[in-house]
Amino acid sequence: MKVLVIGCGIIGSAIAFHLGHLGIEVEVWEAQNQPGLGATGAALGILMGVSSSKTKGRACQLRLDSLKLYDQWLPQLEPGVLLHQGIFCIPSDREFWHSLAETRLAQGYSLEPGTLRGWSGFFSPTDRVVHPRRLLLNLIGRASQMGVKFHWGRQLSRGEVPHADRVVVCAGLGSAPLAPLALQPVGGQGIQVLLPIESLNIPPVHIVDEEGDFNIVPLGEGNYWIGATVEFDPTVLPRAENVSYLLGRAIKYFPEFQSSVVLDSWANYRPRPVGRSAPVIEFLPDRKDWIVASGHYRNGILLAPITAQIVGEMIGSG
């Protein structure tokens, strides 16, 4: 059997990696001249399953199952892919957090109450942070070693019939022309800052307040990622005003960031399904040899392993 994967962001690379493990002949076509230029480029690599507010249903189960798969995947990749084990969360709703902790305990997970520089919250030891770019390149490298063929600057032309037994469309926002799927682009921008190493020593932090949620990821040697924005209105990214906005949010909780220097800013657009829940993983209604796996919105990195497993099962079952 030959499978053609269209799109090589984190979802396409994960599917290629998994199908390669299954011994399936795989080709990956990426329309850009390099991988990960879409939604993957907006990610911070936050893997929030246990500390997520989702406590039941499909969304919850996908997150928890994908976290378990990362236990199998990460040892096969280079050590630098995993940045942190565990995330400290500062929630806005303390009452909900206590309820969430009880639910997770019944599910076999721990959420540990604590404080971080005076802020009350909880530590989720099962959740993680990975480096999105390193993860992407590692998956591509391992898949290549298993015989998967990658083609850059190759897109499916209108009317072209690919020579494959199965086609998997996972091109993010680029999936819409190939599958009957309405996707809304939602912008996301992050920044990298540098401050004196002795000024601040914190773990990865996920913060939820009246403005929404954002993350702070320490990278070592005084470097931190802060992000990402959630921008529904059509806009051109990156925007200069987002830099001061994100820095201001971090300063509110950790004043040491006032002395930081902004080194970089990046942005891209994430595919959010319109009128249905994320993600969309299904056979095309009029073509049972085609599968669409797209619309992961803000959870592409987290859900990559479980998406790849589901696609593998769909290909196996037909």
Image: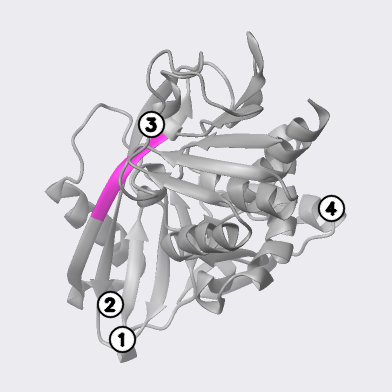
**SS for dot 4:** loop
How would you rate the neighbour count of disc 3 (Cα within 10 Å): few for under 14, some for 14-19, many for 20 or more?
A: some
Task: Looking at the image, tell me whether mark 4 or mark 2 is earlier in sequence order.
Answer: 4
Residue at numbered disc 1: 199
* Front in this rendered view, residue 284 or 27: 27
- What are the residue bounds of the magenta stretch? 266-270
Using the numbered discs, state the Cα–Cα distance from disc 1 to disc 3 in whole angstroms. Answer: 48 Å
Q: Quadrant of residue 145?
A: bottom right
Using the numbered discs, state the Cα–Cα distance from disc 2 to disc 3 in whole angstroms. Answer: 47 Å
Q: Residue furthest front?
A: 163
How would you rate the neighbour count of disc 2 (Cα within 10 Å): few for under 14, some for 14-19, many for 20 or more?
A: some
Check the image and report above or below for 180 versus 70: above
Looking at the image, how many numbered discs can be counted on the residues? 4
Residue at numbered disc 2: 256
In front: mark 1 or mark 3?
Answer: 3
Residue drawn where x is 21% and y is 75% of the image: 260
Residue at numbered disc 3: 155
Residue drawn where x is 63% and y is 35% of the image: 3
What kind of residue is marked 3? Answer: Gln
Task: Looking at the image, tell me whether mark 2 or mark 3 is earlier in sequence order.
Answer: 3
**SS for dot 3:** loop
Q: Position of residue 193 (x, y in %)?
A: 25, 70
Q: Residue furthest top?
A: 286
Circles 1 and 2 in contact, beta carbons < 8 Å: yes
Determine which of the numbered discs, if any, sits on residue 75 in the image: none
Using the numbered discs, state the Cα–Cα distance from disc 3 to disc 4 in whole angstroms. Answer: 43 Å
What kind of residue is marked 2? Answer: Glu
- The answer to if 83 sits in the magenta stretch is no
* Front in this rendered view, residue 301 or 171: 171
Q: Position of residue 160 (x, y in %)?
A: 44, 18
Residue at numbered disc 4: 107
Using the numbered discs, state the Cα–Cα distance from disc 4 to disc 2 in whole angstroms. Answer: 37 Å
